[in-house]
Image (spheres, rainbow, N blue to C red):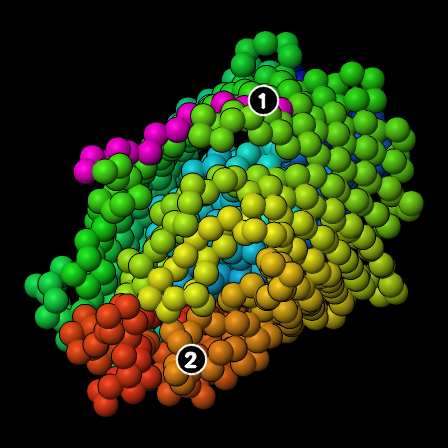
């Protein structure tokens, strides 16, 4: 009798106090498994099952359900829980780049539509359209951003933003400036794509927040948060050239307060290929591993505390086809052999105060052991960085105060760190303070003011002010204008790397002064929703940057030298760019980008275009999903206009300007298996390589140690029957990859 009364009481309470809410989460008539369903304002939530269904018990009352899923815009729906049966269906839309949260522009998390600083966001789905083994290659389909190879043999490179060379681009990991100097040249290829949550790109000076090097723009690589990462992932692919890449990720919850993420990347290419028949490897052989781990700690009041470490090791070589390690450093067979060992440590800690104060810190140790033919290059670089910020809201003012301290140590075996007969490493400590005030007058108008002060003992006081204004004249139309200054202190290694890999000698004409830049950027964002749930996003920008004291490499005065000097005049970078993000309800998606720019230098009344800088570039990505077949088709590519190239003299028979060229790729992805995804396709469909139309790419490839080159009394190369073009060995005539058409096949596995 007591049992019956208990069950009767339970049923009465159930009917009066609450009941189960059922529902399903869908996208275009397909279930979204393991989507997050939460009750806004409470700690209640659940994940959908493999068929997209969920069941959640709630007491009687009014609630707002919030549904989120990676790669899709979050959706909310208000419900009323009473004695009626409730079934709720959610249809999610794929997330637009315009709707995402960004940090880089203001050092605060904010919707991309709300920030007064234009920031471009790229998530892993973007890079999966053309799978690559590292971040450096992945950037080839970002409009206005070009990975530039600087050496035909070792294949090292840097990142150009809006035509400005690599030293003008700052690369951050989780907001930490740990990619600099040596790592800009050697370390970019060691950042595995599997660790990336998203990548944020700011074009134009950002020195008022980030200091030196952020003159042309910055790229912030934001890694995954352990608590929200998949439990286990594998992403592996190989190519018909013999390349193999493996990414692995593992997430664990260690008790209630610690979440842990481990990632590993392994890449190997050990198949020498010489398709252009110059007896030199077309692609550098590489064997590298990168290990990453990140720890998140739960604290009271959700205060932040995270630690991350990464170790990177790489053995790469390129050179004559018969090269072997026994020839390393000798003058019998030419090879460029590079051993790189690198540690990184970074973290964030929110101070236990009522005020929102965050301390971020990082340390890197980079060891380089390289030889270029018979020229050794041994170097060490250490960078320590600490920054304390105070985020304070006061009325309609959103204030940010910060202080930073950066320590750079650099030593090598070249004249860069010599003073007479003594070796004196370059050790510099740069303190800085900055303040930012974001004033929100109303929903339509926001003004951001900023100022940074740094002290460099080599160059004294450096001020970098900043101003940004945003006008939202409708929910789908945003106009922005940004103005500011930037500065760059010369990094001699970054400037003289070309000398190590060829016969040119680096000449520093005088003590180099810091560069200054003055920039104005105008940006317009537009969202258009058409019938049948179609979407168009437009992003239009125009910029003008004026440089004083610009540090320029002179390849023309003497073909045997690279002369670095502050420009006795001025330089200008100006241009316009446009991005279009178009999504049709039938599964067709288009991402189109174009940039038209002019980067020039004016000295003694004469204006010249910058070397290795195109005037036009375009990118595209066309994706189509055939839902009944579980098949995605991605067609990606880029196109570049002509650029000036470094010749070795008037007799050099190679073309002084590059032709129009394009790299195009196609990929097919099948995701009909549970937890598995198969992908394959073709890279460089047009089989384009720079040697087309040129008699050769590497000058004097038959005599890499210049044993048969004759010089006159003034040191100039003489034309001889063996050397009719009066050349020395030089691999710096490079503007695109030598790797031709190839197929690829891969598999992805994810366990949530």
Taking 430 as reference, is 669 above or below it? below
Residue 311 drawn at (x, y percent): 31, 41
Residue identified by numbered label 1? 433
Q: Nearer the viewer, residue 640 or 695?
A: 695
The residue mark sitting in front, 2 or 1, is 2
Query: Please, which residue is most extreme toward the top here?
Result: 353
Residue 384 drawn at (x, y percent): 39, 28
Q: Nearer the viewer, residue 630 or 211?
A: 211
Name the secondary structure under disc 1: strand
Quarter containing the N terminus: top right
Q: Distance of mark 2 from mark 1, alpha carbons?
A: 50 Å
Residue lying at 31% horizontally and 59% vertically, measured from the top left: 505
Residue 742 drawn at (x, y percent): 40, 79
Is residue 444 visible in the rendered structure shown here? yes
Residue 650: mark:
2
Q: Which residues are magenta?
A: 421-434
Q: Quadrant of residue 231?
A: top left
Q: Quadrant of residue 422?
A: top left
């Amino acid at each position: 009798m007591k049992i019956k009364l208990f069950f009767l009481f339970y049923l009465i309470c159930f009917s009066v106090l609450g009941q189960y809410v059922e529902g399903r989460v869908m996208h275009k008539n397909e279930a979204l498994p393991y989507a997050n369903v939460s009750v806004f304002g409470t700690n209640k939530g659940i994940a959908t099952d493999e068929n997209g269904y969920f069941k959640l018990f709630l007491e009687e009352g009014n609630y707002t359900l919030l549904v989120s899923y990676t790669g899709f815009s979050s959706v909310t729906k208000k419900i009323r829980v009473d004695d009626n049966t409730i079934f709720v269906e959610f249809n999610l839309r794929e997330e637009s780049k315009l709707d995402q949260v960004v940090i880089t522009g203001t050092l605060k998390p904010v919707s991309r539509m709300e920030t007064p600083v234009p920031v471009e966001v790229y998530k892993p789905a973007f890079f999966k359209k053309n799978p690559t083994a590292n971040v450096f290659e992945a950037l080839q389909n970002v409009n206005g951003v070009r990975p530039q190879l600087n050496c035909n043999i070792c294949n090292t490179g840097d990142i150009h933003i809006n035509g400005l060379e690599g030293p003008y681009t700052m690369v951050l990991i989780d907001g930490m400036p740990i990619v600099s100097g040596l790592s800009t040249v050697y370390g970019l290829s060691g950042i595995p794509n599997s660790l990336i949550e998203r990548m944020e790109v700011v074009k134009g000076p950002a020195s008022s927040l980030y200091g030196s090097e952020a003159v042309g723009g910055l790229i912030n690589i934001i890694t995954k948060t352990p608590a929200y990462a998949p439990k286990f992932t594998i992403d592996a692919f190989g190519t018909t050239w013999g390349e193999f890449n493996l990414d692995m990720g593992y997430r664990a919850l260690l008790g209630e307060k610690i979440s842990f993420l481990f990632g590993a990347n392994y890449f190997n290419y050990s198949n020498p290929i010489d398709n252009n028949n110059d007896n030199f490897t077309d692609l550098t052989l590489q064997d590298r591993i990168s290990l990453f781990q990140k720890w998140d700690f739960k604290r009271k009041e959700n205060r932040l505390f995270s630690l991350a470490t990464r170790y990177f090791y790489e053995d790469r070589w390129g050179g004559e086809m018969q090269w072997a390690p026994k020839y390393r450093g000798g003058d019998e067979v030419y090879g460029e052999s590079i051993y790189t060992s690198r540690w990184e440590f970074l973290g964030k800690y929110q101070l236990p105060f009522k005020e929102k104060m965050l301390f971020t810190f990082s340390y890197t140790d980079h060891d380089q052991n390289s030889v270029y033919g018979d020229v050794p290059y041994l170097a060490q670089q250490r960078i320590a960085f600490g920054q304390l910020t105070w985020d304070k809201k006061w009325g309609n003012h959103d204030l940010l105060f910060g202080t930073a301290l950066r320590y750079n140590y650099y030593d090598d075996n070249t004249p860069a760190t010599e003073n007479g007969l003594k070796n004196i490493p370059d050790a510099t400590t740069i303190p800085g303070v900055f303040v930012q005030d974001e004033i929100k007058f109303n929903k339509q108008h926001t003004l951001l003011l900023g100022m940074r002060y740094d002290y460099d003992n080599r160059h004294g006081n450096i001020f970098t002010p900043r101003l940004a204004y945003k006008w939202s004249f409708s929910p789908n139309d945003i106009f922005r204008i940004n103005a500011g200054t930037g500065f760059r202190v010369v990094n001699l290694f970054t400037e003289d790397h070309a000398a190590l890999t060829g016969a040119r000698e680096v000449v520093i004409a005088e003590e180099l002064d810091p560069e200054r830049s003055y920039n104005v950027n105008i940006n317009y964002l537009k969202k258009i929703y058409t019938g049948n749930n179609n979407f168009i996003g437009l992003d239009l920008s125009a910029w003008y940057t004026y440089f004083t004291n610009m540090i320029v490499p002179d390849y023309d005065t003497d073909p045997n030298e690279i002369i670095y000097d502050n420009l006795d005049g001025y330089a200008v970078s100006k241009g316009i760019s446009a991005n279009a993000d178009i999504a049709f309800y039938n599964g067709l998606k288009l991402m189109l980008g174009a940039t038209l720019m002019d980067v020039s230098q004016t000295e003694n009344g004469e204006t010249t275009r910058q070397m290795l800088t195109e005037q036009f570039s375009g990118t595209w990505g066309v994706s189509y999903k055939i839902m009944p077949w579980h098949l995605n088709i991605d067609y990606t590519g880029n196109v570049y206009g002509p650029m000036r190239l470094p010749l070795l003299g008037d007799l050099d028979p190679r073309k002084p300007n590059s032709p129009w060229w394009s790299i195009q790729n196609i990929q097919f992805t099948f995701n009909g298996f549970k937890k598995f995804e198969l992908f394959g396709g073709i890279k460089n469909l047009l089989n384009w390589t720079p040697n087309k139309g040129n008699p050769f790419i590497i000058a004097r490839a038959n005599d890499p140690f210049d044993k048969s080159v004759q010089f006159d009394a003034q040191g100039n190369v003489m034309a001889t029957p063996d050397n009719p073009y009066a050349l020395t060995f030089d691999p710096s005539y490079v503007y695109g990859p030598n790797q031709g058409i190839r197929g690829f096949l891969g598999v992805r596995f994810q366990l949530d």
